[in-house]
Image (cartoon, rainbow, N blue to C red):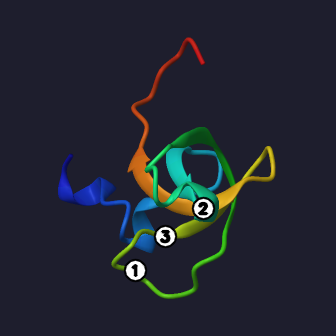
């Protein structure tokens, strides 16, 4: 992962991006949910646990990873 796509930096996250998040209830297990960012909820430019977002399907969680561009999705 290059420095331009760090999920802890707000500037790396944009609405419409495909990301993997960890929801509050999945923090212990580390289970990830993949979806498309609808809204960025974190106001600060950096968060040590990842930027909090809302996905198009309504899930809310912190970005764990930015998914690679996959034209099949």
Q: For mark 3, give the secondary structure.
A: loop
Q: Quadrant of residue 14 in the image?
A: bottom right
Residue linked to disc 1: 47
Which residue is nearer to you in this view: 3 or 53? 53
Residue at 58%, 79% in the rendered image = 42
How far apart are the alpha carbons under marks 2 and 1? 13 Å
Q: Residues within 10 Å of mark 1 (few under 14, many from 20)?
A: some
Q: For mark 1, give the secondary structure.
A: loop
Q: Residues within 10 Å of mark 2 (few under 14, many from 20)?
A: many
How far apart are the alpha carbons under marks 3 and 2? 8 Å
Q: Residue furthest front?
A: 28
Residue at 49%, 44% in the rendered image = 31
Q: Earlier in the sequence, mark 2 or mark 1?
A: 1
Give residue 65's position: percent from left, percent from top.
39, 48
Residue at 51%, 44% in the rendered image = 19
Image marks 3 and 1: residues in contact by CB distance under 8 Å: yes
Q: Earlier in the sequence, mark 3 or mark 2?
A: 3
Q: For mark 2, give the secondary structure.
A: strand
Single out the mark in the foreground, 2 or 1: 2
How far apart are the alpha carbons under marks 3 and 1? 6 Å
Give residue 50's position: percent from left, percent from top.
42, 68
Q: Residue furthest left?
A: 2
Q: Residue furthest top?
A: 72
Q: Residue furthest bottom?
A: 44
Give residue 70's position: percent from left, percent from top.
48, 21
Give residue 27's position: percent from left, percent from top.
49, 60
Image marks 3 and 2: residues in contact by CB distance under 8 Å: no
Residue linked to disc 2: 61
Residue linked to disc 3: 51
Q: Which mark is residue 5?
A: none
């Amino acid at each position: 992962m290059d420095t331009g796509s760090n999920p802890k930096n707000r500037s790396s996250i944009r609405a419409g991006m495909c990301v993997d998040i960890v929801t509050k209830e999945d923090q212990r297990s580390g289970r990830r949910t993949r979806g498309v960012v609808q809204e960025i909820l974190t106001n600060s430019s950096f968060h040590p646990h990842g930027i909090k977002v809302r996905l198009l399907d309504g899930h809310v969680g912190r970005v764990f990873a930015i998914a690679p561009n996959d034209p099949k999705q």
